[in-house]
Image: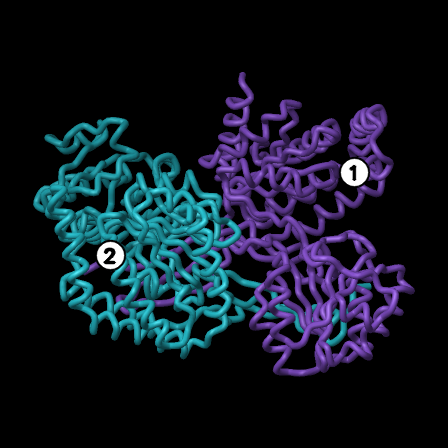
Chain colours: A purple, B cyan
Amino acid sequence: MSIATEMLTLATEARDASRVIATLSSAVKNELLLKMAERLELNAANLQQANQLDLQAGRDKGMATAMLDRLELSDSVISSMAGGLREVAALPDPVGEVTGMWVRPNGIRVGRQRIPLGVIGIIYESRPNVTADAAALCLKSGNAVILRGGSEAINSNRAIGEVLQQAIADQGLPAAVLQVVTTSDRSAVTELLKLEGQIDLIIPRGGEGLIRFVSENSRIPVIKHYKGVCHTYVDAAADFEMAERICLNEKAQRPGVCNALETLLVHRDAAAVFLPQIAKAMARAGVELRGCERCCQLVPGMTPATEADWPAEYLDLILAVKIVDDFDAAREHINRYCSLHTETIVTRDYATAQRFLREINSSVVMVNASSRFSDGGQLGLGAEIGISTSKLHSFGPMGLEDLTTRKFIVLGDGQIRE
Amino acid sequence: MSIATEMLTLATEARDASRVIATLSSAVKNELLLKMAERLELNAANLQQANQLDLQAGRDKGMATAMLDRLELSDSVISSMAGGLREVAALPDPVGEVTGMWVRPNGIRVGRQRIPLGVIGIIYESRPNVTADAAALCLKSGNAVILRGGSEAINSNRAIGEVLQQAIADQGLPAAVLQVVTTSDRSAVTELLKLEGQIDLIIPRGGEGLIRFVSENSRIPVIKHYKGVCHTYVDAAADFEMAERICLNEKAQRPGVCNALETLLVHRDAAAVFLPQIAKAMARAGVELRGCERCCQLVPGMTPATEADWPAEYLDLILAVKIVDDFDAAREHINRYCSLHTETIVTRDYATAQRFLREINSSVVMVNASSRFSDGGQLGLGAEIGISTSKLHSFGPMGLEDLTTRKFIVLGDGQIRE
């Protein structure tokens, strides 16, 4: 069987199975997730045996220690996978929710009701725990899921998939609601990305290279984000103690993530006081500052920023800093360089806060709070399947609701169109 | 200037202008639409002069009368364009609506607020009135719009565009919020479809050929529907008088549209009574029936259906008819052949109606009402920019709300992440 035929068969089975899971009650889906969690824990030894094959292959190829760590299915990773499944089981089910209903003059009632998307493909790298985490969210929202992890985790992913499928079969459900693509043929992804009739959505998770490859080769809608170039604007009317606390948290609490601060904009009337203050605090936290010309005059010893610093996503203890003349200049800088991820203002001024909320159209816009809250869990979505920085379908962190769409339902009593 | 550079320049200007219109108040946008309506009426003679050039070129090429009719900017077409602008002005503005807001345990308030998509490209054929209709919906929802009509209406579209741009300039707004692409170079569309950084959404309106071309060549998300193969299932427990009235309305009131009925499914226990009744009514309405084997046995003289009839979108006074054994068989037939447009059940049975609403996941699902209501205006969306039969972003008829997305807003008082 060619890889194209194999993928089409697999996706067609997923499409058929998606019709079954789409109509299951929340109770049945929750029971399934709990059984999956139990099965993972019971089969920990088998999973770790399969995982050893991947770890050995990684070591043979000279894989870096950090990568090997991410690949390892330790006891605590397995228990956290099981915990994740139980958490998703406890979340509210978005399917079936009627988000609005109204009556037309002729008496028909029109509503919009949430339904699953159908079949979701997840293309990811490295961490095998994504296999369980992503599966939980897709199944809870009534979708079938096709999972394709990286070749470096192929044995671990296959083993996790088999354990989860056993739980599915135990519940009398079609195993094809969850499929793990474990062929070593690299064209499997390219073939999957062509199946627009069978797969409704692709979510790539991994490095920028993977994401670009997927979005350039897909005939299926892709939801993704490339990077997070997050800005914080400290207004003239900011509480500088609060601004310091927020900026430090944004930059230094976990610098390697997409919601970390990358560029700090400071109103010129705040600069004389705030810039030396934040420079000292950042230095204590080990952060290198790269400043505009005016910044460098105010704070001696700051590295001069070049044009390359403004669009940079450092993911490191480095921060670009710029003095701006007013709100408009801050907005123009953000519009030019931001990645539509998360932008923050620190201010005590009501009108300025309102303008920022209205005029900055990134996926998350914050007043007086750390950009580190820009995350599905922190924002209260319960769990996160990914983040979208393109505007169609979902914008920002995505939870269970984002794995659904809405159909119209019409309740009549014999009305016809005149 | 190459056509690629020309399109990039135009789209970049649209992107800049989109930031201006995104933050306008509803009052300013409504005033703009009313001025546009007034300008169209004042310039009726100029528009008709330009339209004459297209009509003459059409006649010279031997264009069919029906096509010439669609191309004509008669007094009544111009007055209906102006009326359409005024209607859109009167609709509620979706921008700024906060669709939900909640408080997290740490006290941050998280909400989701509607914002415009940004820049919308409309690729359409034939009727030049689309230029004004589509522009009104895009501008009202705070988006910039790029319009590319067919070459057969190029002079009319250019003239309408100029009139609308005058109204925009009169209001002191950037004319680039509305741009009409009037180059005769056919690669203009292909170039536009590459500009994923400048354009957020493409909506093609026209025949299946145009829609396939756009969706196969676009790097930008496309919302579209190919066809409407609508089914009505007459249950054993149907009120047959109501079923007859609904089916006739669905098939014969306007057979050439995408929400007309194409396949009638009849429960076997209803067939003996209902099939002869509906056959007689359809015959009076001039509808040709193409029936399954059992149908042909029950109603002599019915044309036998072939496999090609089940997925057919006739757009004509032809109806495929099939007897099914039960609800499951009806659902399986619909799942196999429907285009996810509109499906209807006629029944008096509560449980069967509920099952249909739950288990059929087309974009519009109806109980005891005519499929002809599957339209943005009829469903109460106010106006319709198009219909989507793919599930991402929008599913079903699309109104102003579907030209927006939602950003997260976070209101804090100094919270940081621990």
Identified by mark 1, the residue type is Glu
Q: Quadrant of residue A249?
A: bottom right
Q: Quarter of the image containing the N terminus of chain A?
A: top right
Any part of residue B130 in sight: yes
Q: Are marks 2 and 1 in contact (CB under 8 Å)?
A: no
**Looking at this view, is A118 or B238 the one in front?**
A118
Q: Quick check: B307 left or right of B20?
A: left
> Circle 2 — which element?
loop
Q: Position of residue B178 (x, y in %)?
A: 38, 63
Q: Quadrant of residue A163?
A: top right
Q: In this view, which residue lies farthest toward the right?
A: A284
Q: In this view, which residue lies farthest toward the left?
A: B284
- Residue A41: which disc? 1
Per the image, the residue denoted by label 2 is B128
Query: Residue at image x 51%, y 30%?
Result: A13
Do tags 2 and 1 sit on the same chain? Answer: no
Q: Does B391 sit above or below residue B178? A: above
